Image (cartoon, rainbow, N blue to C red):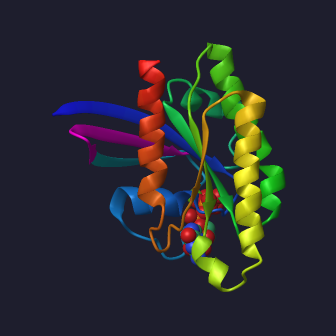
């Protein structure tokens, strides 16, 4: 079986569910009351896709980390996951900085890398259907960023709580990475 190692970063505003997505993906657990992440945190996972064993190296980067300290993590990353929170519409307006930062880091190295924009906590839409508007807004945000930065930016709806969409985030990232390698 072919082996592939993919390194990704998870970024986004405070409390959007970065740790929860990483834990769901690597351990299939949803943590109770996770502590705010203050230092870069590593998560490992393995998945088989079409006869290829992918070893995932996933770094959650703390929201409050100095931007200069994030650069080494972007360097050499095969892709990024940006988490938005459907219960916090403001994350749609404040998160462009994450796309900008990652895309600029790629551009300065002369490389193209995929990013997945995740609308997280979709399990909570049942509480208030108006959150559907945030999901649609997140999708428009992802499509707009793809055009603005000429990068493969993919949109996925997810819930770290129910696990909906979590594997899809990483599978689509992996497929986008492979497509870029072939092109
Ligand atoms: N209902 C629901 N709650 C979620 C989901 N994902 C995360 N949460 C909750 O959102 C809060 C923040 O989750 P974290 O995973 O710590 O978010 P984070 O982005 O890592 O937070 P920081 O590291 O502090 O920036 C916690 O109370 C989680 O239980 C989800 O999919 N659904
Ligand atoms: Mg965290």
Q: Taking the image as drawn, is residue 67 in sight? A: no
- As for residue 121 lying within the magenta part, the answer is no
Q: Nearer the viewer, residue 92 or 150?
A: 150
Identity of the residue drawn at 47% across and 18% down? 183
The residue lying at 29 percent from left, 47 percent from top is: 46
Left or right: where does residue 149 sit relative to residue 93? Answer: left
Magenta-colored segment: predominant secondary structure: strand
Toward the top, the furthest residue is: 110
Q: Quadrant of residue 149?
A: top right
What stretch of residues is rendered in magenta? Answer: 48-62
- Would you identify the image quadrant in which residue 73 lies? top right
Residue 104 vs 123, above or below: the answer is above
Q: Quadrant of residue 7?
A: top left
Residue at point 73% right, 61% down? Answer: 136
* The stretch drawn in magenta includes residue 58: yes
The correct choice, above or below, for 145 with respect to 43 in the image is: above
* Residue at image location 50% in from the left, 67% down from the top: 160
Q: Position of residue 23 (x, y in %)?
A: 43, 60
């Amino acid at each position: 079986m072919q082996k592939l190692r993919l390194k990704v970063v998870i970024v986004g505003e405070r409390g959007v569910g970065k740790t929860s997505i990483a834990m769901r993906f690597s351990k299939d657990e949803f943590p109770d009351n996770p502590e705010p992440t203050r230092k870069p945190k590593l998560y490992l996972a393995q998945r088989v896709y079409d006869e290829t064993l992918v070893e995932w190296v996933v770094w959650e980067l703390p929201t409050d980390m100095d931007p200069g300290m994030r650069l080494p993590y972007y360097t050499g990353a095969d892709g990024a996951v940006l988490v938005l929170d459907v219960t916090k519409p403001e994350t749609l307006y404040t998160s462009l900085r994450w796309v900008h930062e990652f895309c600029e880091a790629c551009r300065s190295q002369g490389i193209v890398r995929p990013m997945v924009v995740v609308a997280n906590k979709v399990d909570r839409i049942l509480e208030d259907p108006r959150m559907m508007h945030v999901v649609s807004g997140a999708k428009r945000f992802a499509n707009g960023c793809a055009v603005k930065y000429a990068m493969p930016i993919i949109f996925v709806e997810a819930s770290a709580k129910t696990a909906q969409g979590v594997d899809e985030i990483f599978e689509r990232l992996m497929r986008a990475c492979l497509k870029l390698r072939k092109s």
